[in-house]
Image (cartoon, grey):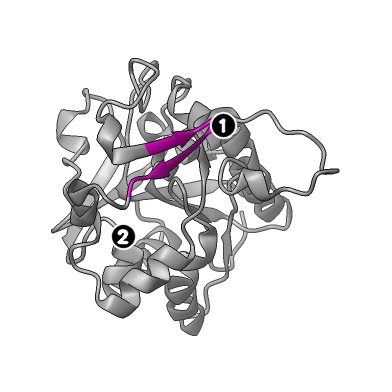
Amino acid sequence: MSGSKPVFVFCPGAWLLPDYFQPTINILKTSGYTSEAVALPSVDSDQRPADAPPISHGLQTDASAVRAAVVRQLDAGHDVVLVAHSYGGLVISEAARGLDRVSRGHGVTSIIHMVYVAALVFDVGAKVWPDDKPPVPKEYIIDGELVYRNPADPDNAAFLSQCSPEQLAAVVAVARSHNWRTFTDPVTYAAWKVVDSTYVKARHDPVPDPVAELPEGHRFVEQVEIGGDHFVFTSATEEVAAVLRGVAENVGRGGA
């Protein structure tokens, strides 16, 4: 196991380029932490060059992209704190399979903690769209294999209720298309049953707290509530960075 500080690997939510993590990454950098933010293949896929190799869209495709980033850091000698936002919670749950301390063995770099920030936490078999179609159709715009959040739906505004006009513009700037097939793929692995994790709930996030509904046996060793809305990396950047720094310091001392 590396004696240096762990590296943060960030997984974004649906529709989003990873750029919105940058303010948080900048804060962590001032404390000596290195970070990597992963771009999900399901996001902005319609902008791929015409001659680009085809990809098979789905939850596992996204998970493979995150897993590749994690393995790259592990192979470089760094332990990893894996961080997810929103839909990314399902992605990191899949990506972490076999990369935890117990699976990797003593003295080998591993994922030492996971942090779910306003993120989805599903058990094996569950889907974002249980019936393979949007549960609330008015919230979405579907165009072939692509899906967008409907900006005209007033319910979507609740997800950004604490953002200033400047912060709202920053979120809009990184919003792209998303391949809806990721929402119809079932979860096949629940890493939160294996890896010690922290759940960060934003006070004004309209998404219900998922940890309260989890079956026994989960490894959420800490639950933290902070300010902000669903886009907490933008609306409460300093607070979420402080939580992540605290997690890294704790696991660095041999904590959970």
Amino acid type of the residue that numbered disc 2 sits on in the rendered structure? Phe
Secondary structure found at label 1: helix
Q: Is residue 55 left or right of residue 221?
A: right
Image coords of residue 208 (percent x, y) = 16, 40
Let me know if residue 107 appears in the view.
no
On whether residue 45 falls in the magenta region, the answer is no
Tell me what residue is drawn at x 53 percent, y 57 percent: 17
Callout 1 environment at 10 Å: few (<14), some (14 to 19), or many (20+)?
few
Q: Nearer the viewer, residue 6 or 53?
A: 53
Residue with the most extreme right position: 51
Q: Nearer the viewer, residue 26 or 127?
A: 127
Q: Nearer the viewer, residue 172 or 86?
A: 172
For mark 1, what is the residue? 103
Q: Is residue 198 left or right of residue 184?
A: left
Callout 2 environment at 10 Å: few (<14), some (14 to 19), or many (20+)?
many
Tell me what residue is drawn at x 48 percent, y 84 percent: 30
For mark 2, what is the residue? 231
Tell me what residue is drawn at x 51 percent, y 27 percent: 181
- Main SS of the magenta part reads strand
Let me know if residue 250 appears in the view.
yes
On whether residue 146 falls in the magenta region, the answer is yes
Q: Nearer the viewer, residue 141 or 239?
A: 141
Secondary structure found at label 2: loop
Image coords of residue 66 (percent x, y) = 59, 45
Bounds of the magenta segment: 141-150
Going from N to C along the chain, the mark reached first, 1 or 2, is 1
35 versus 176 height, above or below: below
Image coords of residue 72 (percent x, y) = 71, 51
Image coords of residue 240 (percent x, y) = 31, 67
Q: Is residue 24 left or right of residue 214?
A: right
